[in-house]
Each structure stands twice: as structure tokens, then as C-alpha cells.
Image (spheres, rainbow, N blue to C red):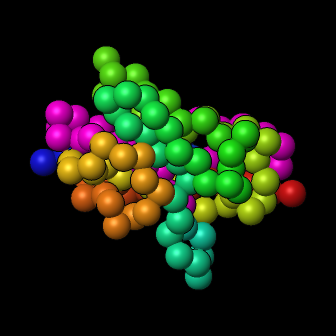
Amino acid sequence: QVQLVESGGASVQAGGSLRLSCVVSGATYSRSVGWFRQAPGLEREGVAAIDTRTGTTSYAGSVEGRFTISQDNAENTVYLQMNSLKPEDTAMYYCAASATSWFPSLSKEYYNFWGQGTRVTVSS
């Protein structure tokens, strides 16, 4: 079984930065880890994902160049560094792990395990 715990969400002004953390327990069973977000009234969307074996990453076009996903295998933690934040980045952010696929997919259907989320609010 895999458990994920997110942290690092906060309220910031536009242009600011945040780093989200996702601690993954049962990491042996997590092949890829993704960050997703969901704003009120909208679908949950993939933001970034990483193949934990190779470090290969994927990004949504809306965040590429501003967000960076990375991992610390010693700490079983996946990070999402978010720079140049915009009000439209406001959402609940979730990390998710796939026990079956190494591919860093941005589709939520690939992921078997989810954290509870951490809230990010960006004000203009």
C-alpha cells in the first residue's frame, strides 16, 4: 500500500514562489508520481509528473518553465517547485502515485493512490 502526504501549500502574492512536498510511504510500490490540481468547479488536472526510476518528467503547458518536479529518493519525497505564480494557479494540489506504470502521465486515470491535498492561493 502507498500513502502520500502533501505539505507546503500557502497563500502568496502573484509572482511569488512555493515548494510543495509529497512524502511517499510504501515507495517501493510507486513507479511514477504526479502532481495534480483542482480549482472549485473545475476538473482535476495534471500539472507535472515524474518517473521515479529514470527521473523523466512531464509538464502541463500552463506551468512549463515555471514549475519543476523533482525527487529525493533518500527522503521518499517528491517536490513541486512553483515559481512566478499566477492567480490562475490557485487550487487544491494533490500528489498521486502509480503502482503499475513508470510513465509520468498527466492523466489522473493512471494513478492508484492519492494524498489529501494542500491548498495554494495566489492573490493578484
x and y percent of residue 82 in the render? 66, 40
Which residues, given as a range, are shown in magenta?
Answer: 10-37
Residue 38 in sight: yes
Magenta stretch, overall SS: strand
Q: Nearer the viewer, residue 45 or 10?
A: 45
85 shown above or below 68: below
Q: Is residue 82 above or below residue 92?
A: above
Residue at position x 70%, y 56% in the image: 62
Q: Is residue 105 left or right of residue 1?
A: right
Image coords of residue 37 (percent x, y): 54, 60
Quadrant of image for the C terminus: bottom right
- Nearest the viewer among 84 and 18 is 84
**Residue 75 location, quadrant:** top left
- Residue name at image x 78 percent, y 59 percent: 87
Q: Residue at x 72, y 41 (%)?
A: 66
Does the magenta-highlighted stretch encompass residue 33?
yes
Q: From the viewer's perspective, is 2 left or right of 90?
A: left
Q: Position of residue 26 (x, y in %)?
A: 17, 38
In the rendered image, the residue lying farthest to the bottom is: 41
Q: Which residue reaches farthest left?
A: 1
Q: Residue at x 41, y 46 (%)?
A: 104
Depth check: give the residue in front, 78 or 5. Answer: 78
The answer to whether residue 2 is left or right of residue 46 is: left
Task: Note whether residue 11 is visible.
Answer: no
Magenta-span inclusion, residue 31: yes
The percent position of residue 118, horizontal first and vertical second, equals: 49, 53
Q: Give the total number of marks visible in the rendering.
A: 0
